[in-house]
Image: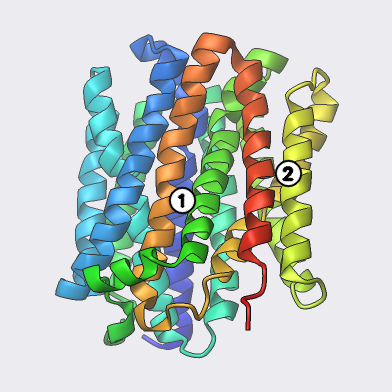
Amino acid sequence: MNRHASNNIIFAFKFMAAALTTVLGPMLGALADEFGLTLAQSGLMYASQFSGFAIFVVAGGTLADRFGKRTVLTAVLIVQCIALLAFSASQNYAFTLLALFFAGGLCAPLDSVVSSVMLDLNPGESERYINKGAVPFGLGAVVGPVVAGFCLANNVSWRSVYVVLAALCMLMLAISYLIRIPKQSATNRITLKAAGTILRDWRFMLVCLCLFLYCGAEASAWGWMSEYMEAGLSFSVLKSSLAIGAFWLSITLGRALCNGLMNKIPTRLLMGVLAAFSALVTFIAAFVSSEAFAWVMIVLMGLFYSSQWPLMAGQTAGRHAAFSGTSMAILGCSGSIGMAVIPAFLGLIAENFGLFVSQVMPSFFFIAILILFCFIARPDKA
């Protein structure tokens, strides 16, 4: 199959990975009702999913080096299909967490493996294709929760939704064999020696801390949005799912806008504006009591959250070119740990101090990111 067709299939995989990741948000209320979960227990479901992210993104890269990307992609899709079916059949909370660890967590290596294949297929055009790949990922993040909310609003069981997703994994497995996968470059390999070298770079470690905070705040925003909207503004399940879709659509549009601004505005200034306004909008959103104003805040949050991840990750470009695979794995793992820890932490905060406090807290994460980025983006001394 030619390069163009292979790229299109990869874009379809990125769409699916995003949809599988974000579909949990609208489902959380139905799961909480069925298993009688507290807010803290609901937060642990995100912790389970994103703990899988952190572990499997590193394991997937290592195994891809050892056995090949096609082999790992095949294994990921088969195990994910089984996990989705197990999740749909779960009868208790503990088994649900275990199944979600695999079903949601395997989205990370699914996305990272097909992304690395995309870069192998398009040498010399990495930035262009990373940006192009963000579009179907963003669209998948929009469609996943909206379709899930529509199904729940029409009395379709959350279990049936996950059975359909398992079938989709099997379909994509068959399609995956149409992708042309080039031989792997040595610089994509993950090694302990490379990890040691990278972890001694203080600037790189500050980027990892920023990604931990940012990814945790972003995952909390869309993950808890349904709960916030339904409890605070009496949104229906469908309407709260549309809110998550609007958030991700705004992120996608924001990334497109920032791509055009990156060549015109210094990175330090652009990142500072995004982080500062993210803190402000997130803080104000906690006080919203009007439905119309809530929609405005959701859109603004998506726009200002949008390009912080690529701007932060871009600060590491060229610093460890010989260990690009390892550095990307560490960056991805840092963000995944944030996605696992912070939503669960905010669930505990909501359980003990109320939803309002948990809504306000991410604004302080963005203030910390703003301060840290001032040090990260500071030019090296001659």
The residue under label 2 is which amino acid type? Ser
Q: Is residue 31 visible?
A: no
Q: Is residue 46 visible?
A: yes
Q: Quadrant of the C terminus?
A: bottom right
**Looking at the image, is 376 positioned above or below residue 86?**
below
**Looking at the image, is 192 positioned above or below residue 283?**
below
**Looking at the image, is 145 positioned above or below residue 249?**
above
Which is nearer the eye, 150 or 332? Answer: 332
* Label 2: few (<14), some (14–19) or many (≥20) C-alpha neighbours in 10 Å: many
The spot of residue 140 in percent (x, y) is 53, 52
Residue at figure coordinates x 50%, y 81% from the top left:
318
Label 2: which residue? Answer: 278
The spot of residue 9 in percent (x, y) is 43, 71
Residue at figure coordinates x 32%, y 57% from the top left:
57
Label 1: which residue? Answer: 335
Which secondary structure, mark 1? helix
Which secondary structure, mark 2? helix
The spot of residue 120 in percent (x, y) is 39, 83
Residue 104 falls in image quadrant:
top left
The residue under label 1 is which amino acid type? Gly
Which is nearer the eye, 74 or 294? Answer: 294
Q: Are marks 1 and 2 in contact (CB under 8 Å)?
A: no
